[in-house]
């Protein structure tokens, strides 16, 4: 049995992960960490991970960048593998995560959906074959409560394309004041906010007289919870290093 510490357990995603976890016979959430310690489930919730007395095999962090230092420090000092599912991390925090992976297993993905990560794989292949004759645009849609725009996943897709194409492209976010023809070295990134859209991402390859579009729609937040729990199962017996959805999908 893999015992999990769930960081951010009282947040929206924490609740979803808790409800989904009973579908996985090989793991259980042994304890939770959150600034809100109101208990709503079967495991103990602590306002400081150092207070945990439970045996722990893996930590899943699905919280907020403000909690990054606390949870990373705890996992480093206790040598607990860490699945970092929190988005919006700074470049400095990502560097800290990379440095920590030399002494402990770390799993990081900008999006925990298996489908989104498969989309990225497909989009990279398409970009490599089509970029000379096709323009590339990314459209992302999310609910009206999402603060950041464009989404971290939109950047993840764009960065993956750009890495495949030797960083040749610049990102254009707003064309209303951009009074000139579209350049070939652009990737347009566009954000839509409204209603309760869980998350939609489209990558458009627009050529002469033909359009290829690759889409992903998230119907609920459960897909991100399932991805995080699968990552925890994958990570718990790994050697120190940085792991990603590419490693998980390669199985």
Image (spheres, rainbow, N blue to C red):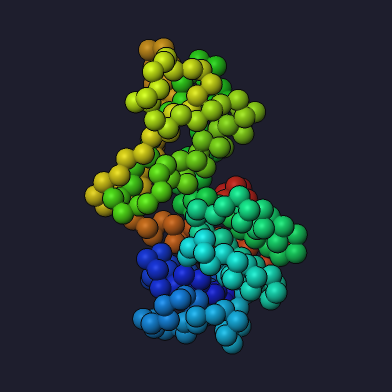
In the rendered structure, the answer to whether residue 199 lies left or right of residue 106 reads left
Residue 207, percent from left and from top: 43, 16
| Camera sees residue 202 | yes
Residue 237, percent from left and from top: 68, 67
| Above or below 10: residue 113 | above
| Camera sees residue 219 | no
For the point 65% across and 70% down, which residue is it?
73
In the rendered structure, the answer to whether residue 46 lies left or right of residue 70 reads left
In the rendered structure, the answer to whether residue 195 lies left or right of residue 40 reads left
Residue 239, percent from left and from top: 73, 63
Q: Quadrant of the N terminus?
A: bottom right
The front one of 116 and 178 is 178
Residue 105, percent from left and from top: 68, 62
- Farthest-out residue, left: 195
For the point 42% across and 32% down, which residue is it?
173
The front one of 99 and 16 is 99
The front one of 196 and 223 is 196
């Amino acid at each position: 049995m893999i015992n999990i510490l769930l960081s951010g357990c009282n947040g929206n995603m924490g609740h979803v992960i808790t409800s989904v976890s009973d579908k996985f016979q090989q793991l259980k959430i042994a304890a939770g960490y959150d600034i809100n310690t109101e208990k709503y489930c079967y495991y103990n919730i602590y306002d400081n991970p150092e207070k945990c007395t439970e045996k722990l095999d893996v930590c899943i962090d699905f919280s907020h960048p403000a909690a990054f230092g606390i949870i990373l420090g705890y996992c480093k000092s206790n040598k607990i593998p860490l699945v970092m599912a929190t988005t919006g991390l700074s470049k400095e925090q990502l560097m800290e995560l990379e440095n920590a992976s030399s002494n402990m297993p770390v799993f990081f993905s900008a999006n925990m959906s298996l489908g989104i990560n498969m989309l990225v794989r497909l989009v990279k292949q398409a970009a490599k074959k089509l970029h000379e004759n096709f323009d590339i645009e990314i459209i992302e849609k999310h609910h009206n409560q999402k603060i950041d725009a464009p989404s971290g996943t939109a950047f993840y897709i764009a960065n993956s394309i750009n890495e495949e194409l030797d960083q040749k492209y610049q990102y254009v976010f707003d064309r209303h004041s951009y009074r000139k023809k579209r350049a070939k070295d652009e990737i347009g990134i566009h954000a839509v906010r409204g209603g309760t859209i869980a998350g939609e991402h489209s990558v458009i390859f627009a050529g002469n007289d033909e359009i290829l579009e690759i889409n992903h729609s998230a119907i609920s937040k459960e897909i991100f919870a399932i991805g995080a729990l699968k990552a925890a199962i994958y990570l718990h017996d790994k050697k120190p290093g940085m792991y990603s959805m590419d490693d998980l999908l390669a199985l």
